[in-house]
Image: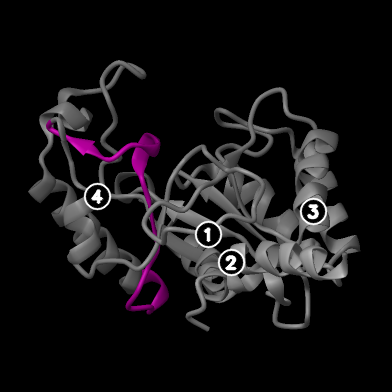
Amino acid sequence: MRAPVLIVALSLMLALPAWAQKAIGPHGEKAAIALTYDDALPSQLDIAIPQLDAAQLKGTFFLIGREIKGNLLRWKQASAGGHELGNHSVTHACPKALFPMPPQYMSENSSVAVQLTEIETMNNLLQAIDGRNEHAYATPCGQTLAGGEDYLPALRTARLTRYVRAAGEAGDGTAPIDPFVVPSRFFGQGDTGETMITYVDGIRRRGGVAVIGFHGVGGDYLEVTAEAHRQLLAWLQAHRSEVWVGGFTEVLDRATGKR
């Protein structure tokens, strides 16, 4: 009866992506987490980055071009400190039904060509800040429609980015990853440190990969409290031998076998 059991076990192993069958972290860690922060918010500079630095952890910050004026030097310093800067477009066009916005920021009034131009322009701006010639992209409002047309197929072939972070559909952290639809789990108002720790502990136990998303930290909007964020970082720091916290691009490079 051992042969059938062995066959089943081997089948299950082969069904897993390669990174789930071996250590994914640079020091043998079995699980990986990317902490990502959207919209270039002041609370990220004032609270999130100091907390990350205190815990000796790195985050990825997806910046909106129209939101970084006045803080260019601080974002440059964040990059110099080891944090990754990512592309969240220039205008952050979103569906008009989500919240009040000027017409020029409505995705219904955009187009595929405009969105690709925005991504390219933002890449150039980010390169001027951090000196890197490649940046990951996060879809504004987690959607890829511009003027009613999906711009993701065009982005796949445009060579403007290798990775696109999506929103939702996070799963259990062990499924194969489409580099242009990278799932993420967002936390915000009402989510406690315990809630977030329970989630990442599940990723640890399964030996998975997860991308966590935030907006405000201790302020701004869709925010988690500063204390909840600190508790999550403290847990990650205490479990760093098992869970590797890396930049979004670093984590995806390892998860997709490109490093």
Image-based side of 183 in relation to 124, left or right: right
At 79% from the left edge and 38% from the top edge, which residue is drawn? 228
- Regarding mark 4 in the picture, which secondary structure is present there? helix
Q: CA distance from mark 2 to mark 1?
A: 5 Å
Q: Circle 3: is it few (<14), some (14-19), or many (20+) Cα within 10 Å? A: many
- Give the spatial CA distance, label 4 vs label 2: 24 Å
**Residue beneath disc 1:** 176
Mark 2 touches mark 1? (CB < 8 Å): yes
Please check the rendered image and state whether residue 132 is part of the magenta-colored stretch, yes or no. Answer: yes
**Disc 4 target residue:** 152
Q: Residue at x 12, y 36 (%)?
A: 110
**Which SS class for mark 3?**
helix
Q: Is residue 100 above or below residue 201?
A: above
Residue displayed at 14% across by 55% down: 117
Reading the chain from its start, which is encountered first: label 2 or label 1? 2
Q: Do labels 4 and 2 touch, CB within 8 Å?
A: no
Percent of width and height locating residue 79:
52, 70
Q: Earlier in the sequence, mark 4 or mark 1?
A: 4
Q: Which mark's residue is nearer the viewer, 2 or 3?
A: 2
Image quarter of residue 156: bottom left
Q: Amino acid at mark 4?
A: Leu
Residue 101 badge: none
Name the N-terminal-most of marks 2 and 3.
2
Question: Looking at this rendering, what residue extends furthest in the right direction?
Answer: 238
Q: Which residue is mark 2?
A: 17
Q: Is residue 214 magenta?
A: no
Spatial CA distance of label 4 from label 3 is: 33 Å
Question: How far is mark 4 from mark 1, CA to CA?
Answer: 19 Å
Q: CA distance from mark 2 to mark 3?
A: 27 Å
Q: What are the residue bounds of the magenta stretch?
A: 129-147
Is residue 211 something one can see in this rendering? yes
Given the image, on which type of amino acid does mark 2 rest? Pro
